[in-house]
Image: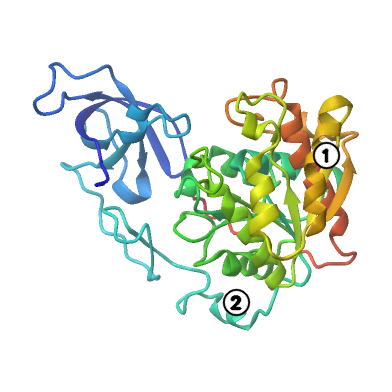
Amino acid sequence: MPSMIRWRRGEVLQLLPSWPGVAACTVAVEAPEGGPSPGGAPVRALAYTDLVGSPREGDTVLLNTGALDLGLGTGGYAMVVALPDRLPPDRRGPGHLVKARYTPLQATVLGADEQDSPHHATLRAAAGVQGMPVVVADLHSSLPAVLAGIRAARPQARVANVMLDGGALPAAFSRLLGTLREEGLLAGCVTTGQAFGGDLEAVTVHSGLLAARHVLGADIAVVCQGPGNLGTGTPWGFSGVACGEAVNAASVLDGHPVASLRMSEADPRERHRGISHHSLTAYGRVALAPADVVVPVLPGVFGATVRAQAEPLGARHTLVHVGVEGLEEALLDLPVKLSTMGRGWEEDRAAFLSAAAAGRHAAALVRHGDRQGPPARSCSP
């Protein structure tokens, strides 16, 4: 069946508050050819400025409205494909890594692992990540919670995010990343696979982990996809399967994999209540290498349910029961708002406590005397 893009033309009405790498605006959309007239109500649109340039009020824009029309939460924007009357200047620079390959918006970036990179020799010689704890989480929204757990136990640890390509491909879409870096909680982001726009670019999660350790100087890496995720309600059709592969990659590189369990006490879908089937499948069937599976010690019936659901994972992995005392304060002290699948702290505490417990455990694994690496690069997605 052919894939579909919903093309629309529009005019920029107003520029909205934006963030590095992204210009947000409202656009008056023209009616599609042969459709009703006039066009629909103004829509919110995003332009990735490094790809298409910066829109101005009155500009004509070409839009892709597919995700917006489907009502997707994370994808609830029209995407600016081009400013046809004011094309951005050509950008010249090193790098021949092409991401979003063979799509109309494929972009060339400088990979940390490619020959023109100043880090090529370092990564070519790197055999592993020297026992670095690697926290693996399903959702991007888990990242700040993991960092809260790390900071509560080891505030001086350098932490890097290794971003997978199962969700948003542009790192710039994540406002979390910029804030976490500005607040000193994150040393940087490495975008891997087809994801792009991080402080460093890498071809695979393997070279991304090596870059996190040997270029960003991370004591701990947190691997997760970008904002948004794909699920179909089938046993294998979800982007979080990549969590199991990330555990394997960390193990192959002599890292210490730490599996963060996705869980919820409020999700209306049965398959995500307690421990999500995403985690049970990714760690129970995809991850072939052993990991520390962190089971937060939660009270009451819900806590007992989680412990029972986690038990089968002990056949392959080490179950580590981690207390959550003091983590609420660490989570609420974060400089970003906690939100997962549209639910905040009060609606789904277990989701955030689980990720924070994984961070607490990873912090305890950092070997005494591990070097603090070079300063984080200052470039922004």
Question: In the shown orientation, is residue 135 left or right of residue 327?
Answer: left
The image quadrant that residue 139 belongs to is top right
Amino acid on which disc 1 is placed: Ala
Name which residue lies at 31% across and 35% down.
66
> Residue 336, image x and y in percent?
65, 32
Residue 312 visible in the snapshot: yes
Q: Which labelled disc corresponds to residue 123? A: 2
365 relative position to 175: left or right: right
Is 97 placed above or below 123 here? above
Q: Relative to 161, is 301 above or below?
A: above
Q: From the image, tell me which residue sits under label 1.
A: 308
In space, the residues marked 2 and 1 are separated at their CA atoms by 42 Å
Q: Is mark 1 on a helix, strand or loop?
A: helix
**Front position in the image: 343 or 248:** 248
Asked whether disc 2 touches disc 1, contact meaning CB atoms under 8 Å apart, the reply is no
- Mark 2 or mark 1, which has the lower sequence index? 2
Callout 2: SS: helix
Q: Residue 62 carries which label?
A: none
Circle 2 residues within 10 Å: few <14, some 14–19, many ≥20: many
Decide which of 251, 191 is in the foreground and name it: 251
**Residue 355: x %, y % from top left:** 74, 41
The answer to whether residue 25 is visible is no
Q: What residue type is labelled 2?
A: Leu
Q: Which quarter of the figure has residue 369? A: bottom right
User: Against 6, is 212 above or below?
Assistant: below
| Residue for point 26% across, 46% down | 1
Q: Which residue shows up at 49% across the image and 53% down it?
A: 165
Q: Which residue is rendered at x = 76% and y = 72% of the image?
A: 130
172 or 16, nearer to the observer = 172
